[in-house]
Image: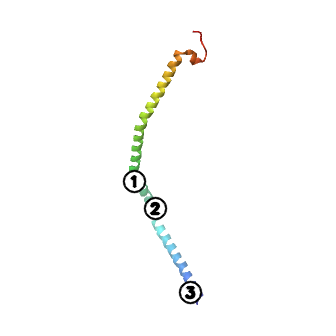
Amino acid sequence: MSTRSATHRSMDLVEGTGAALVGGGVITMALFPLALPMIALLAALLAIAAIPLLLLAIAAGILAAAVAAPVMLLRALWRGSVRALSRMRHDRHPSRATGWLTDG
């Protein structure tokens, strides 16, 4: 008698699982025509939700550019002045610039 009740329990489990899978398949097939519109709606909602994040990223980029631009400008001016001073020194002392000693 114990084997018979265990068999009924396992068969009930198989039947219940099969019924749930069939029901899931029926619902999936019924909702399938709505899949593409739902995907499009989800994509539109995600795009709209991403706008504040994009604005935040753009604002951070503008702020970083506003800080970096003067620093880069000062570095460029400093390098230019160092090069100009270096050229002036070499122009005053041609022997140093070329590495040859000249008669004075």
Q: CA distance from mark 2 to mark 1?
A: 21 Å
Q: Find residue 96 and report its horizontal and vertical position in percent.
A: 57, 18
Which of the two labelled residues, at mark 2 and mark 1, occupies the earlier sequence position? 2
Dot 1: few (<14), some (14–19), or many (≥20) neighbours within 10 Å?
A: few
The answer to whether the residues at label 2 and label 3 have Cβ atoms under 8 Å apart is no
Q: Earlier in the sequence, mark 1 or mark 3?
A: 3
Q: Which residue is mark 3?
A: 5
The amino acid marked with disc number 3 is Ser
Q: Amino acid at mark 1?
A: Ala
Q: In front: 32, or 50? A: 50
Farthest residue toward the bottom? Answer: 1
With 5 as the anchor, is 30 left or right in this view?
left
Left or right: residue 67 versus residue 94 is: left
**In the displayed structure image, the side of residue 104 where residue 26 appears, left or right:** left
Residue at 55% of width from left, 84% of height from top?
8
Element marked by disc 3: helix
Name the amino acid type tagged 2.
Ala
Q: Secondary structure at mark 1?
A: helix
Which residue is under mark 1? 49
**Is the C terminus in the top left, top right, bottom left or bottom right quadrant?**
top right
Q: Which mark is residue 71?
A: none
Q: Is residue 102 above or below residue 50?
A: above
Which residue lies under the disc numbered 2?
Answer: 35
